Amino acid sequence: MDPTSKKRKKLVKTIRIDVDKCNGCRACEVICSSFHASPKYSSSNPERSRIRVIREPLRDIYVPVYAGEYTAAECSGRDKYTIDGKAYDECAFCRASCPSRSLFKEPDSGLPLKCDMCESDPPLEEPMCVQWCLNDALVYEEHEVEVEEEEGVEQGELELGLESLVDRHGLQKLMDTIARMKKKG
Ligand code: SF4
Ligand code: SF4
C-alpha cells in the first residue's frame, strides 16, 4: 500500500428500490418537485422531479428511476432489458440527463436535474421521496466506507448547470451574457 495515501471515512447514502412494491402513485415525483421548488413547496410539477416513475399500467410496469449525472453527449449504444418476461424500452433504466431525451431536465431552462438525496439545512432524517412512499418501495439506508482522499471536489448543482450551458451555447456567449446582465444590474 502507498504509505503516503490518505484515507477518510465517507458516508454512503443509498435508496433501495423494490419495484414489486411500487404501484405508480407518483407521490415521490410530486414531493420531490415541490421540495425543490423555489420558494420551497410553492409549486409541484413532476417534470421538475429528480425521480421519475416509468409507468405502464396495462403491462403492470412501475419503475422509479433517480436522476443521475449530466452528460453532454448521448451514448453510442442502447440496451434493451427483459425482466420477468416484461420488456422495457431503450434507455428505461438510464439515470443520465442526456441530450437525446427530455427526462431529468428542468422544463423551462433545460438545465440538468440531479438527485441530491435531499440535501437540506437542517438535514432531513430521510429523503422526501422515501418519506412519501407509503408502499415502502423506497427504503433509505446509509453506511460508512473508507476511501482514498480525493484530490478534486464533487461538482455542485451550480457547476453542473453552468457546464450544460457552456455545452449548449459556448463559453464566449455565456460570458458575454453574464457581462451584459452585470451592466444592467
Ligand atoms: S411513491 Fe413509492 S409507490 Fe408511489 S410511485 Fe413513487 S416509488 Fe412508487
Ligand atoms: S432523494 Fe430527494 S432529491 Fe432525490 S429524488 Fe428523492 S426527493 Fe428528489
Image (cartoon, rainbow, N blue to C red):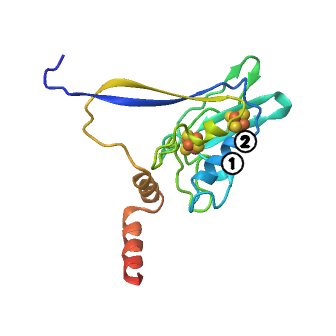
- Residue 91 visible to an observer of this rendering: no
**Residue at 58% over, 58% down:** 40
Amino acid type indicated by mark 2: Arg
Which residue in the structure is indicated by mark 2? Answer: 26
In space, the residues marked 1 and 2 are separated at their CA atoms by 6 Å
Residues at circles 1 and 2 in contact by the CB criterion of under 8 Å: yes
Mark 2 element type: loop
Q: Name the residue nearer the viewer: 125 or 106.
A: 125
Residue at mark 2: C-beta within 8 A of ligand 1: yes
Quarter holding ligand 2: top right
Where residue 136 sits, quadrant-wise, is: top right
**Residue at 67% over, 45% down:** 29
**Residue at 59% over, 42% down:** 128
Amino acid type indicated by mark 1: Val
Residue occupying the far right of the picture: 58
Which residue in the structure is indicated by mark 1? Answer: 30
Q: Is residue 1 above or below residue 13?
A: above
